[in-house]
Image (cartoon, rainbow, N blue to C red):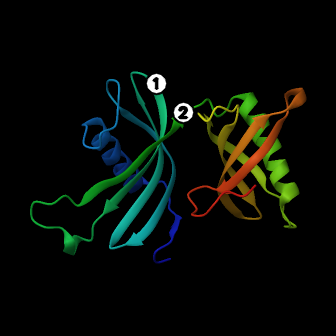
């Protein structure tokens, strides 16, 4: 789809682009504070957007001496006809720290994600409920609340999607869904 971001496979090329982005951050080309040697751990998700070239929008896990981190990076791969003689074919155009890489397999976050997806299904008017596949990351929000953003992979029918669920602790070890939105989609969150 021209102009819109669409899911992309996590393949050798995607890993190569993720490595490029981490190297740019590691060598200080993007004013990103790191402690020690930053290394790519894995690519969590990938999207591509066709522009004058291709924007690769990746969520990656990387680690430095301070520990693991989850980053969202955008790398612009220029069209080969637009690359000048001394110009790079790729450019890191955007990055942000999504949060520390949490133990996504932690029972607490798994339970929170299950409860969040159940509440998402209650708010949906679809005949096909979302099924939780896995928790990709859990990031405590630094907004003075006890809210946590969970990046989850869900399935509805035969379509897989990623959602960012903001949950907060409730009574009796339960979690309440505060808001949600499709991951990497433009537009406001739905409450």
Is 51 situated left or right of 27 in this image?
Answer: right
Q: Nearer the viewer, residue 187 or 95?
A: 187
Q: Nearer the viewer, residue 11 or 76?
A: 76
Q: Which residue is mark 1?
A: 67
Q: Label 1: state its secondary structure.
A: strand
Q: Earlier in the sequence, mark 2 or mark 1?
A: 1
Q: Position of residue 112 (x, y in %)?
A: 77, 37
In the rendered image, the residue lying farthest to the left is 85
Q: Position of residue 40 (x, y in %)?
A: 40, 37
Q: Position of residue 163 (x, y in %)?
A: 66, 53
Q: Residue at x 23, y 61 (%)?
A: 89
Q: Nearer the viewer, residue 148 or 61?
A: 148
Q: Which residue is mark 2?
A: 101
Is 63 situated left or right of 190 in this image?
Answer: left
Binning the other alpha carbons within 10 Å of mark 1 as few (below 14), some (14 to 19) or many (20 upward) gives: few
Q: Residue at x 74, y 40 (%)?
A: 167
Label 2 and label 1: CA atoms lie apart by: 8 Å
Q: Quadrant of residue 22?
A: top left
Q: Residue at x 69, y 44 (%)?
A: 134
- CB of mark 2 within 8 Å of CB of mark 1? yes
In the rendered image, the residue lying farthest to the front is 144
């Amino acid at each position: 789809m021209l102009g819109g971001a669409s899911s992309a496979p996590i393949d050798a090329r995607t890993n190569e682009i993720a490595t490029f982005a981490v190297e740019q951050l590691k060598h200080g080309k993007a004013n990103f504070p790191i402690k020690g040697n930053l290394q790519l751990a894995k690519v969590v998700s990938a999207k591509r957007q066709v522009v004058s070239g291709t924007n690769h929008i990746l969520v990656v896990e990387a680690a430095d001496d301070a520990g693991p981190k989850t980053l969202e990076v955008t790398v612009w791969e220029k069209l080969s006809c637009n690359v000048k003689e001394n110009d790079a074919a790729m450019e890191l155009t955007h990055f942000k720290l999504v949060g520390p890489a949490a133990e996504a397999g932690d029972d607490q976050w798994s339970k929170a994600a299950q409860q969040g997806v159940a509440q998402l299904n209650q708010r949906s008017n679809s005949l096909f409920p979302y099924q939780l596949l896995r928790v990709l990351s859990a990031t405590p929000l630094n907004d003075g609340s006890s809210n946590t953003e969970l990046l989850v992979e869900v399935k509805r029918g035969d379509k897989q999607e990623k959602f960012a669920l903001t949950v907060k602790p409730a009574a009796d070890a339960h979690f309440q869904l505060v808001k949600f939105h499709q991951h990497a989609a433009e537009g406001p969150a739905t409450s």
